[in-house]
Amino acid sequence: MSRIDDLIQGLSPGGIEFKTLGDVGTFIRGNGLQKSDLTDEGFPAIHYGQVHTYYGTWATETISFTSPGFAAKLRKAEPGDLVIATTSEDDQAVGKAVAWLGEAATAVSGDAFIYHHSLDPKYVSYFFQSEQFQGQKMRSITGAKVRRISGDSLAKIRIPVPPVEVQREIVRVLDSFSVLEVELQAELQAELEARRQQYSYYRDFFMTFGDEVKWLPMGKVTTIVRGSSPRPIQSFLTDKDEGVPWIRIGDVPAGGKYITATAQRVTTEGAAKSRMVHPGDFVLSNSMSFGRPYISKIEGAIHDGWLAISDFSESFLPDFLYHMLRSAPIQREFARRAGSSTVSNLNADIVRAVPIPVPTMGAQRRIVAILDNFEKLVNSLVDDLPAELDARRTQYECYRDRLLTFKEAAV
């Protein structure tokens, strides 16, 4: 921060002047643009919802457009203006802003303000992310479920206005932090992907057997049955504690292995019309992302989008069967037998007929020990990735707030 300190000392030795946002700019409400008006080409357009979900600190291109004729009726942000989302169900997100740095104007929807001002655009956008802005903004948010802030309230928020040279230097430093964050995320994602590929390689390597082991159809060494759905399912859903867990694909975390809880329950009558699985049983998706195995740790009912696999303890260790069902050779065989139609399905007869290797229990234990270690490494990286990014983001936010904190000039 020494360069910034030097600039301040040379240009504003008595401190930094604070002004209201209304002193240095004007707020103009967007109008008329609905999601249904957005197109893939035409006149650039920003919908307030996209400020929440897509845009960062600044943007030079829009992800949506609208027709030029319709755009003529809309209010527009000029290059250098901020586009501010004024509503959200989350107080923290109210007032989220993006600096528009495109070459020409962009149309702006309602529930957003266009802030036309005299400051460095990125500097103002970074200020809108700061603790200073958030603290002042919170006092002016209104509404019940949908929270909002008015242009009059935004205009009263005080912002430090250092010389433009200081504004630009702060922007340069914060931009470099943003680049480092993106690079860190890419680096961590690449590390995670490398570990996943390594796990997949060794899993497929250890699951490739020849004539040295016995091969049998899955139906000879396991019991495979299809789930069943009580219909209409809405008539059998219940919030009561005595309800039976109703297992759906969404109940398993992405990349997860175990089913430990469900979001919904069905009545005992619904469960009787369904198929029950018990702790230790496998469920296998039989349509869409078919062939993905999971191990149930609960007793629950499954619908006809699942197959249940049980009675395998004499032939397989559960973890070995899990790794094997996920391996490329078995997945390719599932895909080949399911067919190449638009929607492929695995029925119980197909899965029963798939030949699988049955190595000794000793060999299974050795393979499981190796593959479990790889799986733990991948899972630890999955857990560490958001934690590492959160730590770096917290560090960045602290530094950003320090850069935007000034000694105020005496009035």
Image: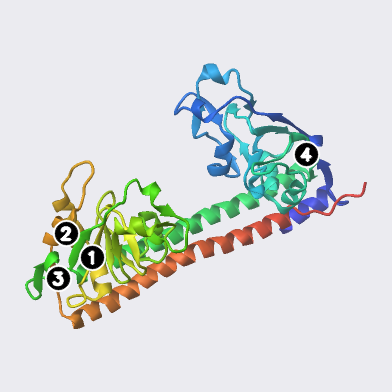
Mark 2–mark 3 CB contact (< 8 Å):
no
Pinpoint residue 253: horizontal percent, then vertical percent. Answer: 41, 60
Residue situated in front as seen by the camera: 343 or 280:
280
Q: Mark 2 to mark 1: distance in Å?
A: 10 Å
Across and down, in percent, residue 147 comes to 67, 42
Indicate the secondary structure of the residue bearing disc 4: helix
One can see residue 252 in this view: no
Give 221 or 113, whichever is nearer the viewer. 221
Q: Tell me which label, 2 or 1, sits earlier in the chain.
A: 1
Mark 4 and mark 2 residues within 8 Å of each other at the beta carbon: no
Residue denoted by label 1? 309
SS at circle 1: strand
Q: Read off the residue under disc 3.
A: 221
Q: Earlier in the sequence, mark 4 or mark 1?
A: 4
Residue that carries the numbered disc 4 in the rendered image:
153
Asked whether disc 4 touches disc 1, contact meaning CB atoms under 8 Å apart, the reply is no
Residue in the image at 21% along x and 78% along y:
364
45 vs 224: above or below:
above
Q: Nearer the viewer, residue 20 or 147?
A: 147
User: Dot 2 corresponds to which residue?
Assistant: 351
The residue carrying pointer 3 sits among few (fewer than 14), some (14 to 19) or many (20 or more) residues within 10 Å by Cα, namely some
3 and 4 marks in contact (CB < 8 Å): no
Task: Give, as a three-letter code, the residue at label 3.
Answer: Val
Q: Amino acid at mark 2?
A: Val
Task: Give the answer, above or below, for where 290 lies relative to 105.
Answer: below
**Secondary structure under the numbered disc 2 in the rendered image:** helix
